[in-house]
Every structure is written in structure tokens, then in C-alpha cells.
């Protein structure tokens, strides 16, 4: 199924039914009086979280949703039937905005969540309500009110603890394969990852975290180069970013230091808040460097970047260093999970 992380839909709640104009008529009750019932309320529309969904692809073609109207009232003080509520399943992590005003309506981040997006109209009043000592045969009723109608912008931001960053072919997909059961495509050409991937890393029983891999960035991504930066929104909710660096690029002129700086610059252009997120440096493909040169290469890069945060030298292809890295990540996440996350910060106009 094609990955879709943004969709626009239109929702129309049901109208309330009109109140009834009716009088009681029985053979031996010549002045039975009014008995018009109320109209039923219109059906409302809710979005609900479905953990089995991971894309908004279902909304590529189904874009119009209407809830049933309430029935009009009946005689003998019988109210009309209410319209059934319409419940639309969406993936966890879906942000909902009003497409016309940009107003934030809600954020669906946990299983079973229900978000009201269009309220059904109220049912009207039958003429029974208007009977009085001076008006024993009222012919006045109240019509039902219309249901809400609005266009919604749905935006999916994947829920993950750790996000992977890096240039194309930095080894992000290979790393995700090495530490989780996810099986993203791996090949020796750029942009093998075309849409975000999720993987669950199980450190031990009952200790795990989720990793999100997004397509590789290149310099100029903020201006649309490569696949652009549209997928960076999927890292907004993460607590830690892993910046993977290819320490043995096939191009001898490629400079890992320049590559790290270019990714950091694209992050700042996309969202200063995301650029300030805790970011660890993961130096990958160390197995392709002669053993006697590895330490010197690592120290040289760290000095050039003046890097003060955690640094890990690994080989995703052989698994070397991956276990130590995931153990450190797990420990760090366990210390921060008690604190509120910062995903609500806006990710700039690109988001």
C-alpha cells in the first residue's frame, strides 16, 4: 500500500429532525390537544485511533463523509429516531486541523481515542412544547438545526521514541534491520527508503522502544532537493535523534564532517525546535576502515565538529556496536519517559 502522510477530507454531520405538528385525535376525546413529538438529533462524526493503520492512504479516494440525519418527530408524542454517529478510523499520531482556518482540532496519540470533528444538529421541538392555558391548540414547532460541515486536513506524524537521520546510503535501513524486526529495503544506491519505516527494538523482556527511519536528506533538501524534507515531520515526536554518518563513503571526495553539518543546517531550516532535540552521532561502516585507523578517524571527526554529545562507532552490516548503542538508548529513554515529551512544538511552515 502506498504510504500517504497527508490527506484532506470533508465531513458533514447529520441535520436534526424537525419537530412534529400533530393533534391527538380519538373517537371519544373531542379536544385531545397537541401531541407532536420532537425531532431526532443528527449523527455526529468522530475520528478514532486504529493501531492497525500506519498510513492515510484510505483517504486518497474516500474524501467525503456524511452522518445520517435525525428523523422528524411523530404524533402521539413520539420522538424521531436519532441519526447514528459515524466513526472514522485513522492511524495513531494523526493531527487534525480545519483545512480552511488552520485551527488545530485535535491530536490522536493513544489507542481508543475519539475526537469529535463534526457535531450533529439538535432535534426540533414538536408542538406539544407550546401548549399553554391560553393556547391549547398551538401550531408552532421548531425545526431541527443543521449539522456541522467542515473540511479537515489530516497530517500523520509517526509515534516513535528514536528517529534516524542521515545522508542517503548512510546505512539507516541496515541499522534498522540490525536492531529490530523491520525489513526495509537495502541497496547500494541512494534513496532506497522512499517513505518512513518503523521498527520495534526489544532490548530484553518488557523493555523496548520504537525507531523511525525516514528517507535520506541531502544538502538543499529545504529547497526541495532530493526527496525534500516533508518526511522530517515524522521525527517531531521523537525524544532522541540518531545521526548516522557513513565513515567509508564510496566517493573519496566526500567529507563526513561536511555531511554532518549539512544535515544539521537542513534541520535548522525545517524547525529550530527539532534542531535542538537531543542528537547522538552514530559513525557507521567502521568495518570498512582498517582497524589501526578507526580510532584516529573517529577522534578527528569529533574534534572537527566540536561534538559534545554521545558518539558511537558501529557497523550496522556486522552488528558490531549495535547492542551497546541500543542498551544506552533504552537507559536514556527510561530516564526521560517520566518527563513530558515536546512533540507539540510547531515544526515550522514546512510541517
Image (cartoon, helix red, strand yellow):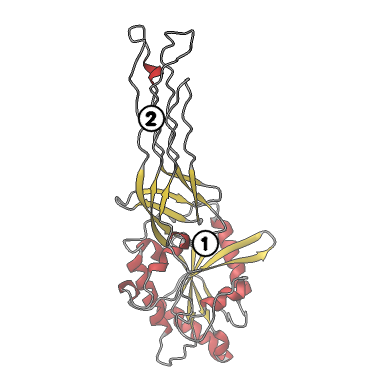
- Distance in Å between CA atoms under marks 2 and 1: 41 Å
Residue at the (56%, 73%) spot, across then down: 176
Residue 143: give x, y in percent of width and height. Answer: 35, 29
Q: Nearer the viewer, residue 347 or 300?
A: 347
Q: Nearer the viewer, residue 264 or 76?
A: 76
Residue 98 appears anywhere in the view: yes
Residue 138: give x, y in percent of width and height. Answer: 34, 15
Residue 152: give x, y in percent of width and height. Answer: 37, 52
Residue under circle 2? 18
Residue under circle 1? 54
Q: Nearer the viewer, mark 2 or mark 1?
A: 2
Q: Quadrant of residue 262?
A: bottom left
Q: Quadrant of residue 226?
A: bottom left
Left or right for 64, reference 198: left
Residue 86: give x, y in percent of width and height. Answer: 48, 45
Give the mark count: 2
Left or right for 290, reference 129: right
Amino acid at each position: 500500500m502506498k504510504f500517504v502522510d497527508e490527506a484532506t477530507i470533508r465531513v458533514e454531520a447529520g441535520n436534526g429532525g424537525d419537530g412534529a405538528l400533530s393533534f391527538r385525535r380519538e373517537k371519544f376525546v373531542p379536544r385531545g390537544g397537541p401531541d407532536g413529538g420532537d425531532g431526532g438529533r443528527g449523527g455526529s462524526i468522530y475520528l478514532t485511533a486504529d493501531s492497525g493503520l500506519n498510513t492515510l492512504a484510505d483517504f486518497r479516494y474516500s474524501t467525503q463523509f456524511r452522518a445520517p440525519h435525525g428523523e422528524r418527530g411523530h404524533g402521539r408524542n413520539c420522538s424521531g429516531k436519532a441519526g447514528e454517529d459515524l466513526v472514522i478510523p485513522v492511524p495513531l499520531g494523526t493531527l487534525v486541523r480545519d483545512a480552511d482556518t488552520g485551527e488545530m482540532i485535535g491530536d490522536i496519540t493513544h489507542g481508543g481515542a475519539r475526537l469529535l470533528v463534526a457535531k450533529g444538529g439538535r432535534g426540533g421541538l414538536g408542538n406539544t412544547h407550546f401548549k399553554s392555558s391560553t393556547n391549547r391548540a398551538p401550531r408552532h414547532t421548531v425545526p431541527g438545526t443543521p449539522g456541522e460541515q467542515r473540511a479537515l486536513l489530516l497530517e500523520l506524524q509517526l509515534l516513535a521514541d528514536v528517529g534516524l537521520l542521515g545522508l542517503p546510503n548512510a546505512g539507516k535501513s541496515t541499522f534498522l534491520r540490525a536492531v529490530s524486526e523491520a525489513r526495509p529495503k537495502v541497496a547500494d544506491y541512494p534513496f532506497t527508503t522512499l517513505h518512513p519505516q518503523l521498527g520495534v527494538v526489544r532490548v530484553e523482556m518488557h523493555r523496548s522502544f520504537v525507531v523511525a527511519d525516514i528517507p535520506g536528506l541531502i544538502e538543499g533538501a529545504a529547497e526541495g532537493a532530493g526527496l525534500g524534507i516533508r518526511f522530517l515531520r515524522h521525527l517531531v515526536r521523537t525524544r532522541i535523534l540518531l545521526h548516522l554518518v557513513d565513515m567509508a563513503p564510496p566517493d573519496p571526495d566526500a567529507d563526513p564532517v561536511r555531511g554532518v553539518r549539512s544535515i544539521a543546517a537542513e534541520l535548522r531550516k525545517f524547525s529550530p525546535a527539532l534542531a535542538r532535540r537531543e542528537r547522538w552521532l552514530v559513525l557507521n561502516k567502521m568495518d570498512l576502515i582498517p582497524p589501526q585507523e578507526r580510532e584516529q578517524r573517529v577522534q578527528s571527526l569529533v574534534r572537527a565538529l566540536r561534538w559534545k554529545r554521545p558518539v558511537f562507532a558501529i557497523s550496522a552490516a556486522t552488528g558490531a556496536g549495535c547492542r551497546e548503542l541500543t542498551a544506552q538508548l533504552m537507559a536514556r529513554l527510561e530516564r526521560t519517559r517520566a518527563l513530558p515529551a515536546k512533540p507539540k512544538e510547531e515544526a515550522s511552515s514546512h510541517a
